[in-house]
Image: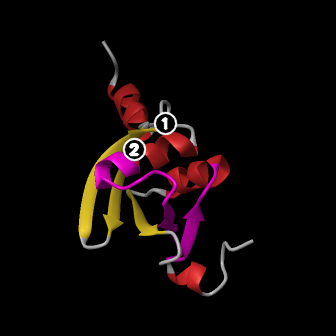
Amino acid sequence: MMSKGSKSSLRGESVLVEVKSKYDAEFRRFSVDKNKMKEYEGFEKLLSALHNIDPQSFVITYTDTHGDLLPINNNENFQKALSTAKPLLRIMVQMKGESYEQMNGYGTI
């Protein structure tokens, strides 16, 4: 039998991240297991299926702990986004060319 301290330490190391995804006027809430979802490409495919849009036709951004909107476009950025989710990872999905950042030159190199 586990002691009370053991249970609370297990809760503190949760591998599930709650995600709130916004695309156009549509919101989706779901969970991601950090131990299973480690690659950006898998996350991109999941969002594509959830929002019924073509893979690689959209950009993904998230709001960090300071309120800044940052891109999720590779494995490193994806892992950073997962680590900042407290308690929720808020992401925005926009079609390529429609995001404010892209219209103003960000991500065009």
Q: Is residue 32 left or right of residue 34?
A: left
> Are the two marked residues, 1 and 2, in contact with CB atoms closer than 8 angstroms?
yes
Q: Which mark is residue 58?
A: none
Determine whether the residue tagged by mark 1 lies in a helix, strand or loop: loop
Q: Residues within 10 Å of mark 2 (few under 14, many from 20)?
A: some
In the displayed structure, would residue 34 be above or below residue 19? above
Q: Nearer the viewer, mark 1 or mark 2?
A: 2
Between 91 and 42, the one lying in front of the other is: 42
Residue type, label 1: Met
Whole-percent x, y for residue 53 in the image: 36, 56
Q: Is residue 19 left or right of residue 60?
A: left
Q: Is residue 31 left or right of residue 12?
A: left
Q: Residue furthest right?
A: 109
Residue at (66% x, 72% y) in the render: 107
Residue type, label 2: Leu
Pointer 1 or 2: first along the chain: 1
Residue at (66% x, 78% y) in the render: 106
Q: Residues within 10 Å of mark 1 (few under 14, many from 20)?
A: some
Residue that carries the numbered disc 2 in the rendered image? 46
The C terminus lies in quadrant: bottom right
Q: Report the span colored magenta.
A: 48-74
In the displayed structure, would residue 17 be above or below residue 35? below
In the displayed structure, would residue 70 be above or below residue 31? below
The N terminus lies in quadrant: top left
Residue that carries the numbered disc 1 in the rendered image? 37
